Image (tube, rainbow, N blue to C red):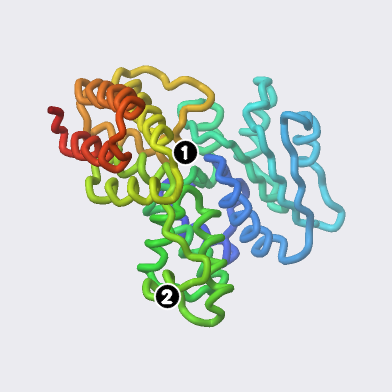
């Protein structure tokens, strides 16, 4: 049933053409993308009629779920049933019954199974995905985010150049929702005018302020010039030097643990989803000994910053060069 190589665009185009799968597995936890997909599905399948039912298996029983799936409507009413916390379906009988339903679904129902995790190593989640239309709704990599953003802004008939989209993803790409919100704010300011690279910086209230994750990303990728630009912007816009240092420690500590094959600790790690998803890419640019050296340099710089009157820019720039060029003197 599931076409594993289907792109976001193909799946959305199928929905709009009324080619609707009976079961979708939405894995990854990006709530904005979940909401967008559910809106498209509702418009195509329910067409303003029918029922949308929300269940969560941390609160609702499996009996309620299967009761809804087996219920017969006298009026052949179409329904979308959205099920969250699917891993809380723990009984072997319940899990088998769900897979049996997915293999022979009710044509009047579209079932959306939602997991905040994208974990196909989990046999239950993989079994669901193998028999469903699988959507990867993790906070997207930059190339996938662009595809989502283009679909959403096209559906909202927003006029914007490709270069301007790239700009908004670069500055606000910690989540799809953030990118779309900033583009929509620009639309309100510009009215019917197209958003392009030339008029972005003329917008009232536009401020080229980077976030800390941008700096972590550029340093992880050893992008020297970009890292210099972002570090200067962070300092000029009020980010304190110790905050920059500690966020670099968070990044390189996670990279060192990954290099050593250790599972990262649960809870707060100091890096967001997009940086976490990029760790494998950063890993290729650093050796184990280099990561150890980086962390030692960060500790030395922390001590130096507390015992010297050297300005912060003069402290951070040599560090960036050392790390990006792998030149430790």
Quarter residue 85 falls in:
top right
Residue at left offset 65%, top offset 20%:
92
139 left or right, relative to 44: left
Neighbor class of circle 1 (other Cα within 10 Å; few <14, some 14-19, many 20+) is few
Is residue 139 in view? yes
Dot 2 lies on which element? helix
Residue that label 2 marks: 199
Neighbor class of circle 2 (other Cα within 10 Å; few <14, some 14-19, many 20+) is few
Q: Position of residue 27 (x, y in %)?
A: 54, 40
Relative depth, front residue between 38 and 292: 292
Residue that label 1 marks: 273
Is residue 298 in view? no
Q: Position of residue 251 (x, y in %)?
A: 37, 31
Up-down relation of residue 137 to residue 150 (above or below): above
Relative depth, front residue between 126 and 271: 271
Considering every residue shown, the one lying at the far bottom of the view is 192
326 left or right, relative to 94: left
Relative depth, front residue between 128 and 298: 298
Residue at left offset 43%, top offset 70%:
200
Up-down relation of residue 215 to residue 200 (above or below): above
Residue at left offset 34%, top offset 34%:
279
78 left or right, relative to 325: right
């Amino acid at each position: 049933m599931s076409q594993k190589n289907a792109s976001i665009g193909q799946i959305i185009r199928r929905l709009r053409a009324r080619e609707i799968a009976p079961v979708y597995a939405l894995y990854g936890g990006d709530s904005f993308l979940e909401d967008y997909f559910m809106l498209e599905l509702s418009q195509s399948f329910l067409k303003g009629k029918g029922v949308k039912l929300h269940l969560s298996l941390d609160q609702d029983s499996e009996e309620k779920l299967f009761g809804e799936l087996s219920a017969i409507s006298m009026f052949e009413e179409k329904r979308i049933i959205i099920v969250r916390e699917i891993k809380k379906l723990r009984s072997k009988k319940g899990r088998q019954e769900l897979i049996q339903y997915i293999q022979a679904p009710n044509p009047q129902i579209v079932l959306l199974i939602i997991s905040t995790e994208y974990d196909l190593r989990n046999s239950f989640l993989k079994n669901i995905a193998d028999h469903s239309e699988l959507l990867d709704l993790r906070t997207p990599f930059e190339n996938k985010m662009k595809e989502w953003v283009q679909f959403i802004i096209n559906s909202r008939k927003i006029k914007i150049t490709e270069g301007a989209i790239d700009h908004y993803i670069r500055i606000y790409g910690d989540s799809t929702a953030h990118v779309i919100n900033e583009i929509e704010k620009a639309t309100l300011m510009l009215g019917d005018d197209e958003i392009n690279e030339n008029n972005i910086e003329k917008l009232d209230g536009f401020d080229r302020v980077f976030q800390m994750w941008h700096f972590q990303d550029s340093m992880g990728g050893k992008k020297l010039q970009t890292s210099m630009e972002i570090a200067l912007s962070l300092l000029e816009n009020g980010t304190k030097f110790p905050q920059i240092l500690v966020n670099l420690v968070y990044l390189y500590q996670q990279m060192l643990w990954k290099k050593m094959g250790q599972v990262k600790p649960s809870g707060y790690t100091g890096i967001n989803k997009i940086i976490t998803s990029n760790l494998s890419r950063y890993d290729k640019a650093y050796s184990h000994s280099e990561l150890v050296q980086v962390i030692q340099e960060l500790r030395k710089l922390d001590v130096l910053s507390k015992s010297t009157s050297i300005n912060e820019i003069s402290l951070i720039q040599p560090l960036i060069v050392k790390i990006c060029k792998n030149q430790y003197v």
